[in-house]
Amino acid sequence: MAHGWTSFAAIGDSFTEGVGDPRPDGTFRGWADLVAAGLAQAQPGFRYANLAVRGRKFGQVVAEQLPVAVRMEADLVSFAAGGNDALRPRFDTQALIDRMDRVVGQLRTSGADVVLFMFPDMSVRLPLPGVLKPRIVAMNQAYTEVAARHDAHLVDLFADAALHDPRLWSDDRLHLNAAGHRRVADHVLATLGVTDRPAPAGSTQLHPRWPARRAADLRWAGAHLGPWLHRHARGRSSGDGIRAKRPELSASGFGTG
């Protein structure tokens, strides 16, 4: 059974902001908006805030968004961060793990129920899988342990084979598309006891021939990897100048459309 939450604050990076799931007006929807809409169906006056900003690393999420979420006193808070850290050459796994425990402890002490995530395996789509996958596994193990220690809700996206399907991802291979965000929302609502679990993945994985894969890789590198490397070499972020899309708890504007 659902808990009966009256407010939800989502904090994190592009994953939580909803990048990859654009509305007709160019703003992003995403799984957190869909979860808020689902929770609101059973709770009149339900309020929702989304503080997430694309490109933010773990420390930035903690410094910029965590204090705001705590002050809001929302009774449900989602926290998803670390993916951008894992993409950087220098990645201190243990330091991030130690901070996870303190962050979730602070949220739980504030009285909020907390939603955490095991990340999907980005290494199946991105370069250097031998470097990236161990980092993802380490973060997922840490989130699992922290969730158990603080009695947080843990959404396991790593085990969902459907999220290996490229048709659930944007062309940049980094952000979910509308179908992918819908799948994540279904997982979150099921974890919270609102809906049933999404159906297991069927035979959805595409296996194009080698020439087609290489051609697609080259197009992706030119359109997405090259600009990403150039931006980060200049110390820039996709989130520069971007503000949270829902900086206050509000009871309107997060329908499913």
Image (cartoon, rainbow, N blue to C red):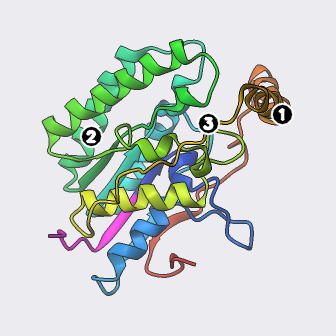
Kindly tell me whether residue 71 is visible in this rendering. no
- Provide the residue designation for mark 3: 207
Residue in the image at 59% along x and 62% along y: 245
Decide: few, some or many residues near mark 3? Use Cα within 10 Å; few <14, some 14-19, many ≥20.
Answer: few
Helix or strand or loop: what does disc 3 sit on?
loop
Q: Nearer the viewer, mark 1 or mark 3?
A: 3
**Does label 1 or label 2 sit earlier along the sequence?**
2
Helix or strand or loop: what does disc 1 sit on?
helix
Instruction: Tell me the amino acid under the disc marked 1.
Output: Arg
- Provide the residue designation for mark 1: 219
Instruction: Tell me the amino acid under the disc marked 2.
Output: Val
Q: Give above or below for 201 relative to 161.
A: below
Helix or strand or loop: what does disc 2 sit on?
helix
Task: State the image coordinates of residue 151 (x, y, percent, origin top left).
Answer: 14, 45
Decide: few, some or many residues near mark 1? Use Cα within 10 Å; few <14, some 14-19, many ≥20.
Answer: few
Q: Is residue 7 magenta?
A: yes
Q: Quadrant of the C terminus?
A: bottom right
Q: Is residue 49 magenta?
A: no
Q: Give above or below for 192 relative to 255.
A: above
